[in-house]
Image: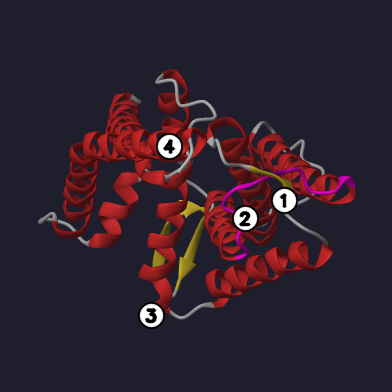
Amino acid sequence: MNTQDILEQARQQVHARTITTAQRRERPWQWAFAGLALTLISGVWFLPGSTLAARLHLVVQGVCAQAHFLYVGPLQMPLCARNTGIYAGFLGSLLYLLALGRSRAGRMPRLPLVMLLAGGVIAMAIDGTNSLLLDMGNHNLYTPHNILRLITGLLMGTSMAVFLLLLFNLSLRANVRTEQRVLGGWHEYAGALLADTLLFGLIWTGPSALYYPLAIFSVLGIVGVLFTTNVFVVAMVSGFENRLRRLPQLARPATIALLLTACELGLLAWLRSWMEMSMPM
């Protein structure tokens, strides 16, 4: 064995010890994250005194307009029609991208696909503005409808999933695949639209037996967006920029972000309740 081989072996041993030490430091935070997540989920699932449906409504009470609701069977969805579309579409599209193996993708889709994704955002903005104009005094261009709110929300959710995943990878990952497009071509975009169509069908025409799966899915979507945003901010402030090689490295930022997410949702729900009680009848 020559000197170069000895030096290389020494470097590998030092690198292995460094990884082992880092993993040992991460482990308490991993347990803290798991414990906090389990506590919060158990609170929503098992808290006595109300139904699970009521508790799901309470979780998102402060972040969603209390109007234009959808119904699955006789039960009201926790989110309004537009937000149901946005956050169910976001979570469904994110799972679709991960299933395609794009967890480390770091390249923009081709320009025509970017324009289509931007078109989904614009469509939702137009429909939302039209609804707002109606509320401001019947200045709307066309009659708003929950079908349009749900469809444009789903398109917006797909766009959010593509661009948030790309932003996450480019900002935090050290091993980002800069040659891999986060959305590879027309057939993959068509797959995302197919997932949106499936979600639309289940939400709009689904039987009451699907209420809880769909309600939980949409709530997970909105909580997931808020949580991911908090993880991103905490990780960047903590110096994780382009350092992430393994998701367990995010245990500390994720634990802090989960606590922030719970506090934000709780504070916003309290503020809405306080404002509603303070308003004159």
Residue marked by disc 3: 209
Please provide percent x and percent y for residue 1.
45, 44
Residue 70 visible here: yes
Question: For mark 4, what is the residue?
Answer: 6
User: Disc 3 or disc 1, which is closer to the eye?
Assistant: 1
Give the percent coordinates (x, y) of residue 13.
35, 39
| Upstream in sequence: badge 3 or badge 2 | 2
Give 258 or 183, whichever is nearer the viewer. Answer: 183
Residue farthest to the left?
A: 48
Residue at screen point 21% across, 61% down = 51
Determine whether the residue tagged by mark 3 lies in a helix, strand or loop.
helix
User: x%, y% of residue 206?
Assistant: 51, 78
The tag earlier along the polypeptide, 4 or 2, is: 4
| Residue closer to the observer: 178 or 213 | 178
Badge 1 is on which residue? 180
Look at the image and say whether residue 51 sits in the magenta stretch: no
Q: Quadrant of residue 253?
A: top left
